[in-house]
């Protein structure tokens, strides 16, 4: 391996949004620094399955449905 090309890999403390903390190894900061998270897996809707819903307000889906509303087989009752 080449010398002096690898980043400094050291131990830091990570503090989650609820105050829990853990130690991990990282190239971020310096030895012993504290990384305070604003968003983490305990609070972000992408991980928690939050109640946010995707809405289409006159966007691509609405334009597609309008454009192809009469395309294809007609519905029979």
Image: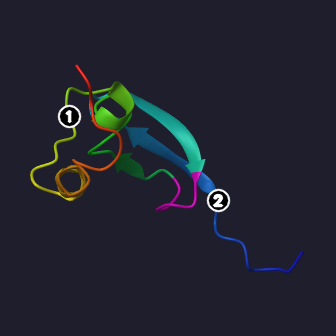
- Residue 36 picture location, percent across and down: 32, 46
Range covered by the magenta-colored residues: 26-31
Dot 1: what SS?
A: loop
| Left or right relative to 25: residue 77 | left
Name of the residue lying farthest toward the right = 1
- What secondary structure prevails in the magenta region? loop
Dot 2: what SS?
A: loop
Q: Quadrant of the C terminus?
A: top left
Q: Is residue 30 magenta?
A: yes
Characterize the local packing of mark 1: few (<14), some (14-19) or many (20 or more) Cα atoms within 10 angstroms.
few
Name of the residue lying farthest toward the left = 57
Which mark is first along the chain, 2 or 1? 2
Q: Nearer the viewer, residue 15 or 69?
A: 69
- Residue 64 picture location, percent across and down: 25, 55
- Please give the residue where the numbered disc 2 appears in the rendered image: 9
Query: In percent of the image, x 82 and y 80: which residue is there?
Result: 3
- Please give the residue where the numbered disc 1 appears in the rendered image: 53
- Residue 39 picture location, percent across and down: 29, 43
Q: Quadrant of the N terminus?
A: bottom right
Q: Nearer the viewer, residue 6 or 42?
A: 42
Instruction: Give the total of numbered labels.
Output: 2
Q: Is residue 77 above or below residue 38?
A: above
Q: Nearer the viewer, residue 28 or 43?
A: 43
Query: In percent of the image, x 64 and y 66: which residue is there?
Result: 8
CA distance for labels 1 and 2 = 40 Å
Can you see residue 10?
yes
Q: Disc 1 or disc 2, which is closer to the eye?
A: 1
Can you see residue 44?
no
- Residue 34 picture location, percent across and down: 39, 48
Query: In percent of the image, x 43 and y 53: which residue is there?
Result: 33
Where is residue 21, by image quadrant?
A: top left
Q: Is residue 46 magenta?
A: no
């Amino acid at each position: 391996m080449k010398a002096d090309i690898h980043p400094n890999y050291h131990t830091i403390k990570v503090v989650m949004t609820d105050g829990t903390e853990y130690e991990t190894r990282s190239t971020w900061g310096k030895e012993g620094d504290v990384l305070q998270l604003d968003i983490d897996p305990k609070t972000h809707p992408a991980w928690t399955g939050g109640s946010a819903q995707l809405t289409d307000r006159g966007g691509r889906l609405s334009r597609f449905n309008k454009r192809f509303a009469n395309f294809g087989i007609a519905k029979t009752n």
